[in-house]
Amino acid sequence: MKSFHRICAIILTIHGILILCINLCIQNKNLSENDRPYRVEINRLAREMEQHGDTAADLSSCRYVTHIEKYNDRSLFTSDSDYVIREIRGILYRFDYRTEVRTDRGRLFLPLNLMLAALFLLTLSVLLWIRQKLIMPFIRLSDIPVELARGNLTIPLQETKSHFFGRFIWGINLLRENTEEQKQRELALQKEKKTLLLSLSHDIKTPLSAIKLYAKALSRGLCSNPKQQAEIAENINEKADEIQNFISQIVRASRSDFMDFQVTPGEFYLSGLLDGIAVYYKEKLSLIRQELVIRKYSDCLLKGDAGRSAEVLHNIIENAVKYGDGKLLEISVRPDEDCILISVTSSGCQLMPDELPHIFESFWQGSNASSSNGSGLGLYICRQLMHRMGGEIFAEIEDHCMIVTVVFSQA
């Protein structure tokens, strides 16, 4: 707000100085020779009278000179108009004139100042309007993302009367609702997993205790009969299978979907998807001096969720930027029967071929990710989203380039 007030003060100060300078120029400017057009007419008439006599003076075309007469002492007091004395052929002539230039300036003074004042008030009104309708509401909204991140925002935001921040407020409310839903899902998931672990740990205690008893009996020689030893060994194996089954349940629970992948089935144009990607990464990649090349393609209508499809390409490109060498980053499109294949190719792939089948697993990171921060979820999310949209995703390595391809169905 201080910066805005400073800008307003500068604009209004410059405006005031401009008004003052214009007024000073109007009031204090001395009449120069060019500002005295009556002298031009007097000089012209004097030349004509010098050449052709006093009868040659024609006042019909004169704007400023009103009268010409021979000068005498009495004529000095018989007229109130301004005049100039000129000697022509030895005779003094009096040229009466009127100064309309000064009158025109006086007439322009008031309207010009009124216009400048109106312009000043208009500028002031616009600045005040911007302050009240844009700056102040935005300042009130500026702390909302921080409060949302802290989890303090529980009441939906109300739309302002001007509706300038309609989409922003709608997005904040949507983000608030999604954050609240995600928190509830996370709490439910944590509760479910905690309950599962407690239940399984309790169930494991029973076969584990039995195994310990059998082992103690064998160690103390209580079962010397081979038939009893074989029976004990069979029981130990059975209890071990129970424990292995419980461990398998724990592993399946840890690998189960922990994120909610909701998609809205629909249709969208391929050009809209790729144009959005190009606009988003144009400035971002220019900062690291890398270029995203999109090969020529034929536009068509695709099936799926436009927002989720963009999210898939964003995740793929982010991985390409993070793990590539920055030399090649391109998107190519090719048709295949009733499908459209969109491939993202990046150079500098350091992933081992035997690691390729695992890149779409959750929390998995390849050997090339040791120096990069990541969660190992990007491509996993891509696969889940593509499957829910009826599509597919796969990857391949060719000439040290990573090629990730997503498959969309044509509408």
Image (spheres, rainbow, N blue to C red):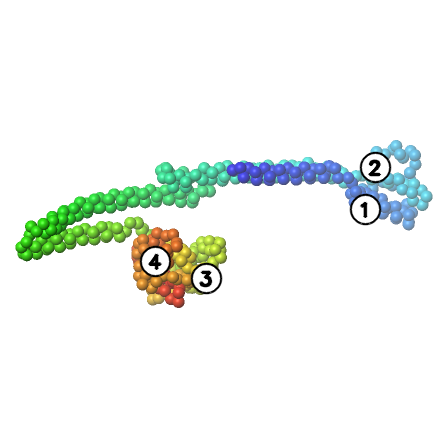
User: Where residue 366 is drawn, which disc sits there?
Assistant: 4
Mark 1 or mark 4: whose residue is earlier in sequence: 1
Give the percent coordinates (x, y) of residue 374: 37, 52
Q: Is residue 20 left or right of residue 75?
A: left
Which residue is at 39% across, 65% downward?
Answer: 400
Alpha-carbon distance for marks 4 and 2?
A: 101 Å
Say which residue label 3 marks. 327
Q: Is residue 214 left or right of residue 4?
A: left
Alpha-carbon distance for marks 2 and 3?
A: 86 Å
Q: Is residue 8 left or right of residue 302?
A: right
Q: Amino acid at mark 4?
A: Gly
Q: Residue furthest front?
A: 220
Alpha-carbon distance for marks 2 and 1?
A: 19 Å
Give the percent coordinates (x, y) of residue 399: 39, 67
Q: Amino acid at mark 3?
A: Lys
Which residue is at 40% across, 45% downward?
Answer: 171
Image quarter for residue 92? top right
Alpha-carbon distance for marks 3 and 4?
A: 21 Å
Residues at circles 1 and 3 in contact by the CB criterion of under 8 Å? no
Of the pair 99 and 122, the residue shown nearer to us: 122
Q: Amino acid at mark 2?
A: Asp
